[in-house]
Amino acid sequence: MFQALTIITIALLLVALGYLYWRRVKTRESPLTAPTIIREPTQHAIVLAHGVLGFDHLKVMGIRHHYFRGVANHLQSHGAAVYAAKVAALGTVPERAQALSSFIEELDEKRVIVIGHSMGGLDARYAIAKLGLSGQAKALVTVGTPHHGSYLAQSAELLPSRALLSLLGKIGLSTDALQ
């Protein structure tokens, strides 16, 4: 009973914080605008690969949120075909890379440019190097990808990290991505 109440409390807190953050972002106008660098429609489709705990899109309180906020719309407004891949939020790199590879292979596109954020960059690199996606991937762009590891991964052996992994496992969440 205590675990259920704890999980519900944490979930409600996360929803409330997410709503407050969304309201703050929605009301704030950014003085920066993205530069227009695409002069003509691209000849390659673009695949967006999200990071750990990511998503292609999700609905919160009836509002659709995209992981790559505004990126797809901007690229599409310049003639690019854009696809947001959906892979397991907490899978291993080989598992997520296989899902990404399958997603790209199912597209009706000869060549793609993959933009991977964080762990999505690792997934795409693995899919290109080890799963044969190099024939279809024209280029890979990684943003914030920990190619040499991350502090979170390096500190996984510390006691609080073990406790967190144990807690996540007990409530039924996969910890493969973190391990």
Image: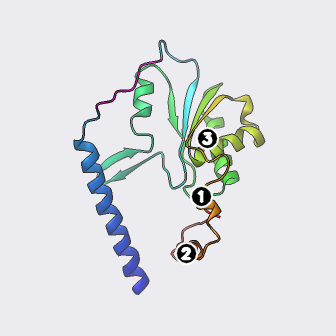
Alpha carbons under labels 3 and 2: distance apart: 36 Å
What is the three-letter code of the residue carrying label 2? Pro
Of residues 82 and 115, the one nearer the viewer is 115
Q: Is residue 35 magenta?
A: yes
Residue 6 location in percent, x, y? 39, 79
Of residues 68 and 43, the one nearer the viewer is 68
Residue topped by disc 1: 151
- The correct choice, above or below, for 103 with respect to 10 in the image is above
Question: Contact, CB < 8 Å: mark 2 with mark 1?
Answer: no
CA neighbours of label 2 inside 10 A, class few (<14), some (14 to 19), many (20+): few
Residue topped by disc 3: 103
The secondary element bearing badge 3 is classed as helix
Q: Residue at x 65, y 25 (%)?
A: 111
Q: Residue at x 54, y 46 (%)?
A: 86
Give the image quarter of residue 166.
bottom right
Q: Is residue 25 magenta?
A: no
Q: Nearer the viewer, mark 3 or mark 2?
A: 2
- The correct choice, above or below, for 39 with respect to 108 in the image is above
Residue topped by disc 2: 160
Closer to the N terminus: mark 2 or mark 1?
Answer: 1
Q: Quadrant of the C terminus?
A: bottom right
Farthest residue, direction top: 40
What is the three-letter code of the residue carrying label 1? Tyr
Alpha carbons under labels 2 and 1: distance apart: 14 Å
- The correct choice, above or below, for 48 with respect to 175 in the image is above
Residue 123 location in percent, x, y? 65, 46
Q: Is residue 46 visible?
A: yes
What is the three-letter code of the residue carrying label 3? Phe
Q: Which residues are magenta?
A: 31-37
Residue 101 location in percent, x, y? 67, 41
Of residues 16 and 24, the one nearer the viewer is 24
